[in-house]
């Protein structure tokens, strides 16, 4: 046996989180819609187990992916959705609803802020019909 059920589940969950955290890179360099990448990641099957802490741990190991998510947020071409931005020493995650901005949380650093943004953004993407997605290229 190569591991307990819990170890196997954790490895699978880590792979899902890594795929989710790579989404903006895979999207930019591939030809699949964000919803297709979410489907391939296996996220929908474990969404209740994908926490901001797990996402933050993954992003901490890959700080360049944080830049990819910042670019993702900045490049969004939609009037409604989550945003991530740096405002001096504070990182802000909020929701844009047409022209009204609703900051949800402020953070002292990019890892926790990006993890909060990713958690919300992927949940929104996962709720879209397969093949749909925000035009972020």
Image (cartoon, rainbow, N blue to C red):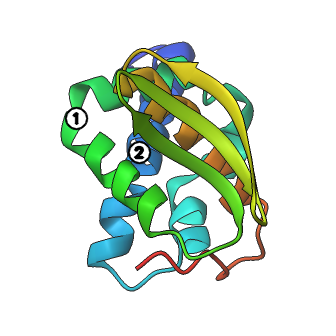
In the rendered image, the quadrant that contains the N terminus is top left
Q: Residue at 71%, 77% (x, y): give it.
A: 130
Neighbour tally class for label 1: few under 14, some 14-19, many 20 plus, Cα within 10 Å: some
Q: Which residue is mark 1?
A: 62
Q: Nearer the viewer, residue 88 or 135?
A: 88
The answer to whether 65 is drawn above or below residue 34 in the figure is above
The answer to whether 137 is drawn above or below residue 82 in the figure is below
Q: Residue at 45%, 29% (x, y): give it.
A: 91
Evaluate if marks 2 and 1 touch, with contact meaning CB atoms under 8 Å apart.
yes
Q: Residue at 46%, 21% (x, y): give it.
A: 112
- Rendering coords of residue 31 (x, y %): 38, 86
Image quadrant assignment for residue 24: bottom left
The disc placed on residue 117 is: none
The answer to whether 2 is drawn above or below residue 103 in the figure is above
The disc placed on residue 21 is: 2
Element marked by disc 1:
loop
């Amino acid at each position: 046996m190569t591991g307990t059920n819990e170890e196997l589940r954790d490895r699978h969950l880590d792979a899902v989180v890594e795929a989710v955290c790579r989404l903006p890179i895979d999207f930019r360099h591939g030809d699949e819609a964000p919803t297709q990448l979410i489907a391939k990641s296996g996220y929908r099957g474990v969404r209740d187990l994908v926490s901001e802490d797990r996402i933050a741990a993954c992003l901490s190991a890959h700080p360049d992916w944080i830049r990819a998510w910042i670019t993702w947020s900045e490049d969004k071409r939609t009037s409604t959705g989550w945003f991530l931005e740096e405002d001096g020493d504070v990182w802000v995650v909020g929701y844009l609803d047409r022209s009204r901005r609703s900051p949800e949380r402020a953070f002292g650093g990019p890892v926790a802020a990006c993890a909060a943004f990713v958690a919300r953004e992927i949940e929104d993407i996962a709720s879209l019909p397969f093949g749909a997605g925000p035009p972020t290229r």
